[in-house]
Amino acid sequence: MKCPECGAWSNVIETRKTLLFGYVRRRECANEHRFTTQEVVIPDEVRRKARSDYGKATHQRLVALHKGGAKAAGETTQTKDA
């Protein structure tokens, strides 16, 4: 992970497991800046649902673009004929 202050890569100094978050990690970068990160483990069920929702939204957008593209093409041919 990069340091938020200087952008240098960091190393983990200490790792603690917590109840509220998954893990709290203490990090230090090459320029001796120290910072803390809180990492949460996401259950597989949530990840699967998010992926399926994303897939549905993508499919719906493609269908809408396809239908809208056909309408737009029809409108342009009508204006050329008129």
Image (spheres, rainbow, N blue to C red):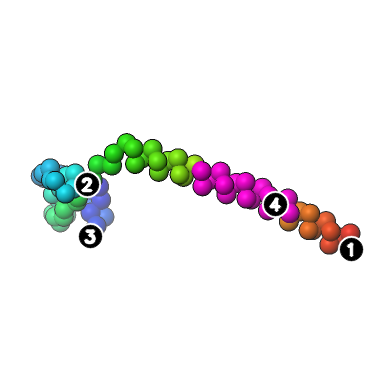
Q: Secondary structure at mark 3?
A: loop
Q: Secondary structure at mark 2?
A: strand
In the image, taking residue 18 as reference, residue 65 lies left or right, namely right
First in sequence: mark 3 vs mark 2: 3
Q: Residue at x 53, y 45 (%)?
A: 58
First in sequence: mark 1 vs mark 3: 3
CB atoms of marks 4 and 3 within 8 Å: no
Q: Is residue 68 magenta?
A: yes
Q: Residues within 10 Å of mark 4 (few under 14, many from 20)?
A: few
Report the span colored magenta.
56-71
Tell me the quarter of the image containing the C terminus. bottom right
First in sequence: mark 2 vs mark 1: 2
Give the residue type that dot 4 points to: Gly
Give the residue type that dot 2 points to: Glu
Q: CA distance from mark 2 to mark 1?
A: 62 Å
Mark seen at residue 39: 2
Q: Is residue 16 magenta?
A: no
Give the residue type that dot 3 points to: Glu
